Amino acid sequence: MEVIQTPIEGLLVVKPKVFEDGRGYFYESWNKSSFFSKGITTDFVQDNQSLSQKNVLRGLHFQNKPHAQAKLVRAIIGAVLDVAVDIRRNSPTYGQHFAIELSETNKLMLFIPEGFAHGFLTLQDHTIFSYKCSHGYNKASEDSLLWNDPDLAINWNTANPVLSEKDMQAKAFNTYTSLF
């Protein structure tokens, strides 16, 4: 397994060692001792999975303290444009984002520490997306930023994604008071 530091401190791309042959492939998507040896020492307590059709945008979601979540995310089937936004007030990259394609083909994963808003746009129909989370869902702590906020300047490469009602009513970044 290879762990690649992104331009945003703590946000890591994980490239698993994949064993392929004529039958298909095998890789460890999570191995506590392997991840711990690479510095990812998060204790994951919940796994989530979603199915979405092409052009569905989910995010930019996060949970505030004390229920903030670190996540390890990947596309099991299909592909997504995955985006993490640094919402750590004292970070030198506060308000900056990182985007990467995660797919069943490239098998990349993204480790997102606490203090990031996260979202993804599905690039294919029938995309299955997996999230390992460090804390369970807590409705009172949930929050979200507007996906197309001009201050964030995220290029989603879509003008009209399919959104939930919650995501349509998310807050603008300049109105968010960071609790991180």
Image (cartoon, rainbow, N blue to C red):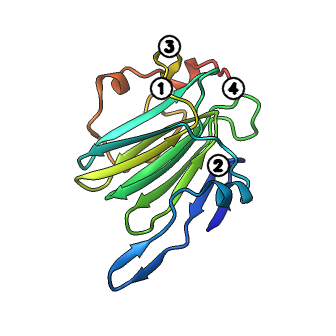
Q: What element carries label 3?
A: helix
Whether tag 2 and tag 1 are in contact, CB under 8 A, the answer is no
Specify which label sits upstream in the sequence, 4 or 2.
2
| Residue at position x 69%, y 31% in the image | 88
Judging from the image, what secondary structure is the residue with disc 2 in?
Answer: loop
Q: Where is residue 54 in the image (x, y as percent from the top left)?
A: 25, 50
Q: Separation of disc 4 and disc 3 at Cα?
A: 16 Å
Disc 4 versus disc 1: distance between alpha carbons?
18 Å
Residue under numbered circle 4 = 180
Q: Say which residue appears at 70% left-offset and 54% top-offset.
A: 36
Report the quarter where the N terminus lies: bottom right
Q: Is residue 148 visible?
A: no
Q: Which residue position holds label 1?
A: 137
Residue type at mark 1: give it. Tyr
Marks 4 and 1, the one that precedes in the sequence: 1
Amino acid at dot 4: Phe
* Front position among marks 1 and 3: 1
Look at the numbered discs 1 and 3 and tell me whether their residues touch, using CB distance below 8 Å. Answer: no
Q: Name the residue under label 3.
A: 140
63 up-or-down from 139: above or below: below
